[in-house]
Amino acid sequence: MHSSFLALALALLPFLAQSTNIVLSNDDGWAEINIRVFYDALTKAGNSVVLSAPAENKSGTGSSDAPATPLIQPCEFNSCPAGSPSQGSNASDPRLNYVNSYPVTSMRYGIKTLAPRFFAGAPPDIAVAGFNVGANLGTTTLISGTVGAATEAAKEGIPALAFSGSTGSQTAWTASVPLYASVYAALSANVTNTLVAGAKPYLPANIWLNVNYPAVTASTCASPRNFSYVLSRINAAGPGATADVRTCGSTRLPTESNVVGTKGGCYASVSVGRADTKTDAGASEQGVVLQRLGGI
């Protein structure tokens, strides 16, 4: 376990005056260790969190959507038996829910069905997806189920973020927590809580954030303290493209791929995207995010 890193990073999170209602999803499945560690980090920071994620690994399914169906085979990692209903929850924690369908379907179920049940009839304040097993950079965002879940939330009018980490592989929630999972969870909780520390609206309409982390090893980027966040673009700007928000003396942001791939540093990229196209937002929306997250 690497709980010391997680505890340290959580201590640095902005103080929350009241609980923030969050729906959490992913595309790797409800029983994958990353989403469970992220759930714990958000909950320990004082948030009210409901997890609604696919029963199986649905990586690479983009914005696919279909009605949930009963389980013919067990859920991933045998986390629910064959024959289970199309939606279900953990016996000891009803806030941990699976949906036997795609990430988009799971996120919508969390927003429309679970949120009112757990949030006293209210919609979620924010939706988060991930953190994904593997980075989601550039055009990969078009096929990512994690991104699909986040953009679906934004289309539903809920501010949304997608988180992805370069290190990791499909791992059951019952395994010992790897170092990378503790680091990515702490970083993701920090971004989430910083975003909601101010007044609503947390993000402009139709906007989502794509956050990616470089590799974590025992000797490289091994602590949340090693990281810096960089405002970035999803895709490179084409010829004649309008200027990005001015920051660091430039009106052209680096691509998220270049940020995460920077040698000799631990840089997390934060890109501002349009939910309807999964492409870059404009300077105005970038400026809103820069103002809200500039402190980190």
Image (cartoon, rainbow, N blue to C red):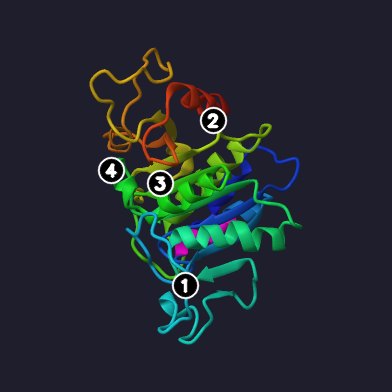
> Image height check: is 237 above or below 106?
above
Q: Secondary structure at mark 3?
A: loop
Q: Give the amino acid at mark 2.
A: Leu
**Which residue sits furthest top?**
249
Question: Is-magenta flag for residue 254?
Answer: no
Element assignment for label 2: helix
* Magenta stretch, overall SS: helix
Q: Are marks 3 and 2 in contact (CB under 8 Å)?
A: no
Mark 3 vs 2, N-terminal side: 3
Q: Nearer the viewer, mark 1 or mark 3?
A: 1
Q: Which mark is residue 180?
A: none
Q: Which residue is mark 2?
A: 293
> Distance of mark 3 from mark 2, alpha carbons?
23 Å
Q: Position of residue 168 (x, y in %)?
A: 35, 58
The CA distance from mark 1 to mark 3 is 35 Å
Could you tell me which residue is drawn at 44 percent across and 22 percent down? 283
> Residue beneath label 1, please?
100
Left or right: 259, with 89 as reference point: left
Q: Nearer the viewer, residue 289 or 277?
A: 277
Amino acid at dot 4:
Thr
The stretch of residues the image draws in magenta is 33-40
Task: Confirm whether residue 5 shows in the render.
Answer: no
